[in-house]
Image (spheres, grey):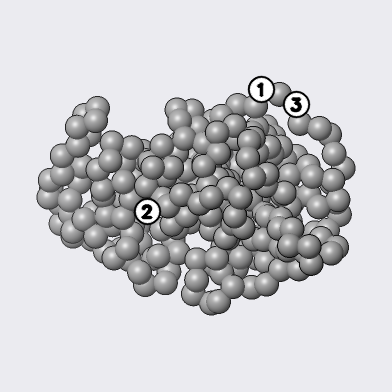
Amino acid sequence: MILSCTGTEPNLNESNILENQGKTVYERFPAPKGFQKQMNPIGSWPAFLQGYPLLSSGSPLLDYKGNPISDQKSHVAVLNIDVGKKDLQQCADAIIRLRAEYLWQTDKKDQIDFKFTSGHSYSWQSYANGTRPEVKGNKVTFSNVTTPDQSYDAFRRYLDIVFMYAGTISLHRDMKAVERKSEYQIGDALVHPGSPGHAVVIVDKAKNLKGEVIYLLAQGYTPAQSIHIVKSGHSGISPWFRIPTSGTVWHKRFYLSKVGVRRF
């Protein structure tokens, strides 16, 4: 799922704007000078991301085996959410995971339904009722093969199946397209579909009096590792991003060259 960087991003100074003791995305990252942000309504998808708990400042990125990854300099925060024990929760999967957790925690479990890259839909309720997929290439069949289980542990096992068969291609295809010249919402995803591809999600935004908007971006990565907020390298505002209205979107570990903005 990696889209490797084929160029070198300018080495820009990081701004020192972090409230390192903040416990959530919203608390830890105040808006840069001249910008303001606001908390979204409780219970909404944007508020869920703004309020997502973070590990303590300086926490390392760990892979699915629990080992620190080699690059510990390109992130500014780690979300307090498990990676799993397999190499599954990567980039698009991290966005699926956050969206599924939001629906689970806000008692919208009947809306937890994702499509595989093949186009086949697989809902949490189907899994909970005992239905499992059998995948052979693009051919997918479903059979009721086990007893019902509505537990959270079962929910995590369901997500591992989704992670295995969904990805950037299905996210790009199935989420609603957003015009790149528009103002984006918290929860929108920037997706480069492909094999490999990549995807990141907006977890906060800020705006100035001129109407300029900047964004915080979070991502998963390959191999499966901690979901984290990345540095932008944009002088004076990093880790916040100015997202261009066309063309490439850079960040510290690589870039998105074919960007589609998508919304749940």
- Callout 1, which amino acid? Thr
In the rendering, at what x and y percent does residue 139 appear?
A: 19, 32
Q: Residue tagged by mark 1? A: 6
Q: Residue tagged by mark 2? A: 156
| CA gap, disc 3 and disc 2 | 38 Å
Name above or below for residue 130 compared with residue 5.
Answer: below
In the rendering, at what x and y percent does residue 229 appear?
A: 65, 50
| CA gap, disc 1 and disc 3 | 7 Å
In the rendering, at what x and y percent does residue 55 appear?
A: 65, 58
- Dot 3, crowdedness within 10 Å: few (<14), some or many (≥20)? few
- Callout 3, which amino acid? Thr
| Quarter holding residue 67 | top right
In the rendering, at what x and y percent does residue 123 appear?
A: 27, 54
The residue lying at 68 percent from left, 72 percent from top is: 38
| CA gap, disc 2 and disc 1 | 35 Å
Q: Is residue 69 visible?
A: no
